[in-house]
């Protein structure tokens, strides 16, 4: 009897997160199906924070979200050409900009001899990363990391491309390691 009296006299509050207790959280639109759902995951998804992108120390963000499709395709084509044969990148250079590719290849000759394999007759890179781009006048400046045969040796470059023309205007070597 005393328990019933105390229960009736108690001040109750409204349910704080009632929907969270009844919501089926096994699937959520904003979460990939392979991500394990735990309360922390839902907290992050339901927050209005900015997206998080991978970041490579000494290189920068790998956020390609603001990059136009045409510009990104040109950057991929250029990097793919550098991984096949540096000379094949010639077709992507803007008129009057071929010197930039020539100087780039010449500056890297010693590094290909030192870090390349015997099969690298065409001075090609093994792989690459494309970083977050930004506008530089009428051109888009794109940071690229080109790897030699091992991931410990690479060169960072900035590629200046013109999306309208679909051509590379300049290549600037930032670092060789």
Image (cartoon, rainbow, N blue to C red):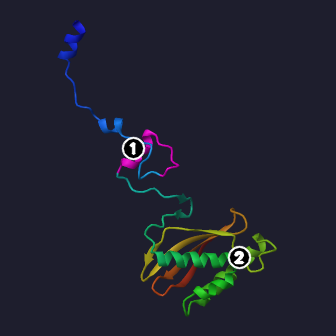
Is residue 53 in view from this perspective?
yes
Find residue 32 and report its horizontal and vertical position in percent: 48, 52
Of the 4 image quadrants, the one containing the C terminus is bottom right
Is 34 covered by the magenta stretch?
Answer: yes
Q: Earlier in the sequence, mark 1 or mark 2?
A: 1
Few, some or many residues within 10 Å of mark 1 (<14, 14–19, 20+): few
Side (left or right) of 118 relative to 140: right
Find residue 37 and report its horizontal and vertical position in percent: 47, 42
Which residue is at a point 65% across and 86% down the rendered structure image? 102
The quarter holding residue 149 reads bottom right
Side (left or right) of 156 relative to 11: right
Few, some or many residues within 10 Å of mark 2 (<14, 14–19, 20+): many
| 51 or 56: nearer the viewer | 51
Q: Separation of disc 1 and disc 2 at Cα?
A: 45 Å
Is 110 covered by the magenta stretch?
Answer: no
Identify whether 38 is placed above or below 103.
Answer: above
Find residue 31 and report its horizontal and vertical position in percent: 45, 51
> Residue most toward the left?
9
> Residue most toward the right?
118
Foreground tag (1 vs 2): 1
Side (left or right) of 15 relative to 40: left
Q: How many numbered badges does the structure rendering display?
A: 2
Which residue is at a point 39% across and 56% down the rendered structure image? 50
The quarter holding residue 103 reads bottom right
Which residue is at a point 56% across and 59% down the rendered structure image? 57
Badge 1 element? helix
Q: Label 1 belongs to which residue?
A: 43
Q: Label 2 belongs to which residue?
A: 124
Of the 4 image quadrants, the one containing the N terminus is top left
């Amino acid at each position: 009897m005393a328990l019933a009296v105390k229960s009736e006299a108690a001040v109750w509050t409204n349910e704080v997160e009632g929907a969270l207790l009844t919501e089926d959280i096994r699937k959520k639109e904003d979460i990939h199906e392979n991500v394990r759902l735990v309360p922390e995951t839902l907290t992050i998804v339901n927050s209005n924070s900015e997206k998080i992108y991978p970041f490579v120390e000494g290189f920068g963000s790998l956020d390609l979200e603001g990059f136009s499709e045409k510009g990104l395709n040109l950057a991929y084509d250029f990097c793919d050409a550098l991984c096949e044969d540096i000379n094949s990148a010639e077709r992507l250079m803007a008129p009057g900009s071929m010197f930039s590719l020539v100087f780039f290849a010449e500056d890297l000759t010693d590094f290909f001899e030192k870090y390349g394999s015997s099969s690298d007759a065409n001075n090609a890179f093994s792989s690459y990363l494309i970083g977050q781009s930004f506008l530089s006048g009428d051109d888009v400046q794109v940071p690229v990391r080109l790897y030699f045969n091992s991931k410990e040796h690479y060169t960072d470059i900035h590629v200046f491309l013109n999306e309208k023309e679909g051509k590379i205007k300049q290549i600037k070597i930032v670092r060789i390691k």
